[in-house]
Each structure stands twice: as structure tokens, then as C-alpha cells.
Image: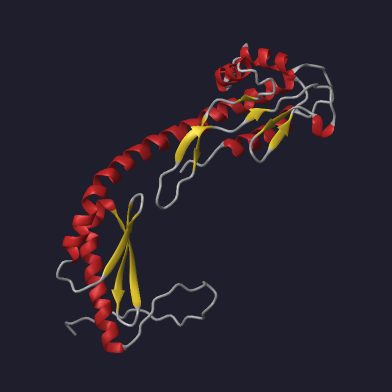
Amino acid sequence: MARPISNQIIHEFSQALHEVGHQTDLTYFSYSELVDALRKSPYAYRFDFEKYDAERAAGHNQTDLYFNFIDKVPGTIYSYPTYKKGNVYLKRFTLSYRRNRALPRIESSRYYCRYRTIEQLMELLAIVVPKIDQFEKEILEEQQQDLRLRRIQEVYSATVPDLVTSSFEGSGLAYWYEMRRDGIFLKTRLPMRLSASFLIKFKNLSTELQEAIAISKEICEAIEKHGRIEIEKYSVNSIQWTETWFTLVNDDE
């Protein structure tokens, strides 16, 4: 599964910096000269000049030049990821003849990578832009997959309530459920204030609802017969288990 790539891109620039070497030259250049050089470069398609020019035309003289790629914001168990412009940009500077923290920087929301000259930045772009192309390709493929899954969710969302109601009708079980982005989270009420939980995918909803009902009934019978039964997770090293093995019995003997 593709992950958000803005911070990963900064990491790739930092790695590329080790490949091209840390230049010691401090050549003077302005931010406008940098932007003009990028417009004429093979990497111009990876910069959002439309946004930059619009902000400059609106009088925002301190605007930054952003990279042009699609990134994603992770979703939750309830919602799908969202897709939007990435958050990597060339931080505006007044002078380039600087030292230490004041060197020109490529930034994201959390990280940055310094560069000293336009030539050095072009070398970095030659290494990193092909990686951005690949990263974005994976993001766009996942976006298309999410769109297909969203359509499936929309179809099932209209039918789930009736299907759940009809499945539990006559079962004698109390239940509760909530919609998730790719299925439902179902709880059934058991004796002694216990409950059973099931994660059921939309594609298997009808079959697994019946299985959940049957399993819940079996657990109810076991609790009523043997008393309180609890099923819980355990830490791998918390208990020293005694292993036993199945013995196959030959009925012909």
C-alpha cells in the first residue's frame, strides 16, 4: 500500500545530497533566478508554476515555489484516504550567500534539505525527480483502487440495514453494528454481560452474517452450560503454554 510521500521526498533529497557531495562554493543567486532556471529545466513539470505565478500576481511577494505532485492523507477504519497536492516546496530566501541554517532549503511540513547552488539543486533533481514520478504513480494507482472501493461501499450502504435486520430476525440475539469503509463491525450480546465481535467484509456479508449468528448462539449455549467464558488476547511471552497434539484414531482398528 502506498504511503504519504511528502516527507519521503525530503529523505530522498537528503540521500541524494550524499551522492552529489556537499559543495563548499557559495555562489550568489536570487530566488527569482532560481525560479527562472527551473522553468527552463527538464524538471519544470514537477513544479507548480501556476500556483506560484497566481500568488505573485495577487501581490504575495513572499510566496514559495511548490513541487507539483499528488500525495495522500491516510484514511481511518471509517473513511478512505484523501488525495491532494503534496507539501514540498523551495523555501523563499532573500540572499543565497549564507551559512548554516540560512542556506536555501527544500522543505516539507516536518523536514528539510539544504542546497548551496542552482547547479547543485539541478543535480539533486536529476536523482530525485524520477523517484517522485514512481511514488506518484503508485499513489495514483491506489487512488483509482479507492474510487472503486468507494463505489462498492455506496452500493452496500443502501442494502446493509435491511440485510442485517432480516439475518437476525428470529435469532433471539441482540446486536449492534457500525459501518466501516470496507465492511461492518458487528457485536452480538451474550449472557453475563459479555459480547462477541466480528469484522465482516462487504463482499462476504450475507454468508458471514449467518456464520456470526451461528457462532454467537454456540457461545451463548457454552456460557449457559459452563458459566462465564472470556476470550482475550495475550502477550507472546506472558504465559508458558503446555503444548498438546491431536491424536488420529483409526476407526477400523
97 left or right of 63?
Answer: right
* Quadrant of residue 46 within the rendered picture: top right
Whether residue 186 is situated above or below residue 47 in the rendered picture: below
Measuring from the top left, give residue 218's x and y in whole percent.
Answer: 24, 77
Farthest front residue in view: 59
Which color scheme is applied? secondary structure
Q: Where residue 30 appears, x then y in whole percent?
A: 76, 16
- Number of numbered discs visible in the structure rendering: 0
Residue drawn at x 62%, y 13% is 39
Residue 215 percent across, percent down from the top left: 25, 72
Q: Left or right? Give the position of 174 relative to 119.
A: left
Residue 16 at x, y = what percent? 68, 31
Instruction: Quarter of the image for the C terminus: give it.
Output: bottom left
Q: Residue furthest left?
A: 170
Front-lying residue, 130 or 40: 40
Q: Residue furthest bottom?
A: 226
Which residue is located at x 80 percent, y 34 percent? 101
Front in this rendered view, residue 20 or 207 = 207
Residue drawn at x 45%, y 46% as measured from the top left? 75
- Residue 99 position (above or below residue 37): below
Kindly identify the residue that appears in the image at 26 percent across and 49 percent down. Answer: 157
Q: Is residue 200 left or right of residue 77?
A: left
Image-quadrant location for residue 96: top right
